[in-house]
């Protein structure tokens, strides 16, 4: 398959490449929420579409826990897997690259090109490991701010994301209200539930108890494959609804011809989870998993503002589109409604929809006419407003 074929695919942005931006050289390191300094800092990012002359068509996409800057398109003509939000990013799609300039960056503490625990610590010449400082959602957003300013953008048409990406989008409206015209927050929350924290902790313990963990100093040897794979399997269960899992797998065995049930008999759902775990180990770093899940756990807009979510949104200037899913039990619809109520108490403009689906939390990653229509209509309206303001 050649490049032209890839670009000719309906709505595809075609072949894309990762770009890198480095800042925070001494003495101007990035100051973190806990007062630590981090520098130099490299951010991996991708862009799709063209920034217009008025620079009022830029949209920042924020990825979830295991995501990366690769939101759309392909890295080569033989690449079989498009970016994680390819269903919604491209010509004629919700994030229409014929109209908008779309940016997606890998978060700091990640492992897909941005500075994280697997990066080289300039002080030692070796990977940071657990010497990497604690990172918060706010720190991720502050690093993205430097990227956006580097790109010459003073105000974003929209910030958008699902799950942890939604947390970043909300934080953007609070940290930099003057820079955000609108916010699309999908399947997210102002703080993770105790149940969500519990699942994250079980995943971390799976890594800690791997014989190859070595207190995070595994880069010169065997990585904690078993622990990271198990962490992903545990996490993946929370992304699906019970109904979707039953419809997809039921109680079927992987070998449909198996007649004898014994210890080696494997259900289809078992095979699926093991496959997800193996795939994850091939592309993700165990230390990044620990740091990012901790950042999610610690995100709490209510606590940051004296226990009152209304105060958190008091000074935001953005218009909002909030979407949730009826079968999402990791970030349930009540979490989104809590955000909507706090915004409306402050008199903010909010569109909210609770989408009926059997796909659970992962629904925001899957193609959906309802999601497509909501985002397209919202962005079209916001862009028209921004044009009138020029």
Image (cartoon, rainbow, N blue to C red):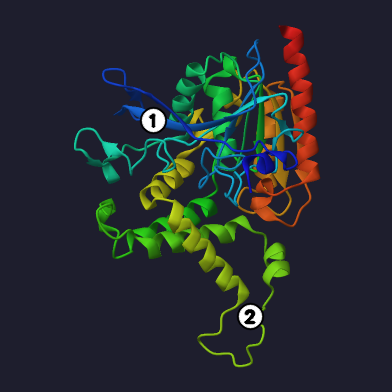
Question: Which of 14/152 is in front?
Answer: 14
Q: Can residue 83 be seen in this view?
A: yes
Q: Where is residue 364 in the image (x, y as percent from the top left)?
A: 67, 46
In the rendered structure, the answer to whether residue 25 lies left or right of residue 376 reads left
Residue on which disc 1 sits = 42
Q: Which residue is drawn at 51% across and 45% down?
A: 65
SS type, badge 2:
loop
Residue 305 — which label? none
Whether 327 is drawn above or below 385: the answer is: below
Between circles 2 and 1, the one closer to the viewer is: 1
The answer to whether one can see residue 190 in this image is no
Q: Where's residue 327, x and y in %?
A: 71, 54
**Label 2 sits on residue:** 253
Q: Nearer the viewer, residue 13 or 108?
A: 13
Q: Name the image quarter holding residue 170.
A: top right
Write down the quadrant of residue 342 in the picture: top right
Q: Label 2 to label 1, Cα distance in Å?
A: 46 Å
Q: Where is residue 335 in the image (x, y as percent from the top left)?
A: 64, 42
| Residue at screen point 77% across, 33% down | 92
Query: Residue at left 61%, top 46%?
Result: 82
Question: How many residues crowd around disc 2 within 10 Å: few (fewer than 14), some, or many (20 or more)?
Answer: some
In this rendering, would 175 be left or right of 348?
A: left
- State whether residue 322 is above or below residue 251: above
Residue occupying the far top of the picture: 390
| Most distant residue in the bottom direction | 260
Which of the two discs, 2 and 1, labels the residue nearer the N terminus?
A: 1
Q: In this view, does 161 lie to the left or right of 21?
A: right
Q: How many labels does the image show?
A: 2
Secondary structure at badge 1 equals: strand
Image quadrant for the C terminus? Answer: top right
Is 190 on the left-hand or right-hand side of 206?
Answer: right
Where residue 169 appears, as percent x and y from the top left, is 58, 31
């Amino acid at each position: 398959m050649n490049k032209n074929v890839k670009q000719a695919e309906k709505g595809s942005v075609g072949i894309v490449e990762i770009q890198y931006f480095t800042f925070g050289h001494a003495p101007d390191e990035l100051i973190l929420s806990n007062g630590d300094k981090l520098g130099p800092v490299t951010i991996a990012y991708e862009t799709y579409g063209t920034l217009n002359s008025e620079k009022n068509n830029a949209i920042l996409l924020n990825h979830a826990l295991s995501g990366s800057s690769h939101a759309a398109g392909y890295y080569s003509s033989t690449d079989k897997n498009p970016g994680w939000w390819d269903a919604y990013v491209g010509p004629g799609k919700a994030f229409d690259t014929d109209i908008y300039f779309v940016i997606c960056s890998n978060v700091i503490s990640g492992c897909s090109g941005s500075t994280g625990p697997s990066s080289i610590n300039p002080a030692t010449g070796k990977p940071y490991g657990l010497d990497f400082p604690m990172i918060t959602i706010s720190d991720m957003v502050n690093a993205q701010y430097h990227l956006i300013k580097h790109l010459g953008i003073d105000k974003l048409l929209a910030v958008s994301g699902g799950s942890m990406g939604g947390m970043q989008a909300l934080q953007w409206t609070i940290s930099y209200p003057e820079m955000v015209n609108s916010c699309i927050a999908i399947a997210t929350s102002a703080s993770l539930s105790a149940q969500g924290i519990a699942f994250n902790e079980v995943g971390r313990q799976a890594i800690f108890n791997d014989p190859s963990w070595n207190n995070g100093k595994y880069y010169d040897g065997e990585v904690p494959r078993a622990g990271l794979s198990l962490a992903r399997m545990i996490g993946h269960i929370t992304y699906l609804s019970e109904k979707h899992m039953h419809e997809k797998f039921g109680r079927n065995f992987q070998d449909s011809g198996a007649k004898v049930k014994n210890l080696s008999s494997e259900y289809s759902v078992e095979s699926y989870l093991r496959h997800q775990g193996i795939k994850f180990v091939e592309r993700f770093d165990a230390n990044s998993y620990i740091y990012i899940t901790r950042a999610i756990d610690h995100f709490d807009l209510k606590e940051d503002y004296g226990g009152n979510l209304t105060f958190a949104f008091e000074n935001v200037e953005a218009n909002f589109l909030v979407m949730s899913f009826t079968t999402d039990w990791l970030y349930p619809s009540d979490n989104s409604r809590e955000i909507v109520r706090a915004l409306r108490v402050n008199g903010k403009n909010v569109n909210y929809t609770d989408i009926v689906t059997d796909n659970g939390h992962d629904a925001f990653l899957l193609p959906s006419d309802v999601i497509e229509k909501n985002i397209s209509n919202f962005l079209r309206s916001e862009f028209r407003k921004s044009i009138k303001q020029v």
